[in-house]
Image: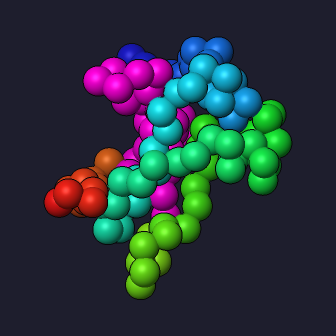
Amino acid sequence: METAANVVALWPRWMENAGALLRMKALVRSRCCKCGTLMRVEMEDVVARRGPGYSLVDKLERCRMVECIGSTFYLATRTYGGQWTTLLRDPKLLEVFEELPPVRTAWS
C-alpha cells in the first residue's frame, strides 16, 4: 500500500519555478495556516527578489496580516476559474496544513 511519503508529486513545467509561473502569467496566492487569509502574490516581485529559478514548492513565509504570527504556503492556477494546486509536497508540511481555518479574503 502506498502512503503519502511514498508518493512523489509531479509538477507541471509551468509550476517549476517563479520564472515559469511569471512567463505563463499564472495566478499565485498565499494562504495563512493561522488566520486563513488568502493574498495575491505578484510574481514580478518574487522574481525580482529571489530570481527566476526560485521554486515556491514547499516554501513558507510569514503572514503579512497585522498581528498574525502564522505561516503562509502557496497555491497556483493557470487561469481564473481553474483548479488551484497547493504547492506543497513534503509529507510533514501536508500533515501540518491538513486542518486550516476558513479562507478570509477582502470580501469576507
Left or right, 50 with reference to 3: right
Is 24 magenta? The answer is no
For the question of whether residue 31 can be seen, the reply is: yes
Q: How is the image coloured?
A: rainbow
Q: In the rendered picture of this protein, how many numbered marks are placed on residues?
A: 0
Q: Residue at x 43, y 80 (%)?
A: 66
Judge whether 104 appears above or below 46 on screen. below
Is 77 magenta? The answer is yes
- Give the position of the N terminus as an image quadrant: top left
Judge whether 69 appears above or below 81 on screen. below
Q: Residue at x 40, y 60 (%)?
A: 32
Left or right, 51 with reference to 36: right
Q: Residue at x 68, y 50 (%)?
A: 45
Q: Residue at x 58, y 15 (%)?
A: 12
Q: Position of residue 18 (x, y in %)?
A: 69, 35
Outermost residue, bottom side: 67
Residue 35, by quadrant, is bottom left
Q: Position of residue 21 (x, y in %)?
A: 62, 28
Q: Position of residue 101 (x, y in %)?
A: 24, 60
Magenta stretch bounds:
71-97
- Give the position of the C terminus as an image quadrant: bottom left
Judge whether 91 appears above or below 5 on screen. below
Outermost residue, left side: 108
Judge whether 27 appears above or below 60 on screen. above
Q: Position of residue 97 (x, y in %)?
A: 38, 51
Which is more toward the observer, 74 or 107? 107
Which is more toward the observer, 54 or 46? 46
For the question of whether residue 5 can be seen, the reply is: no
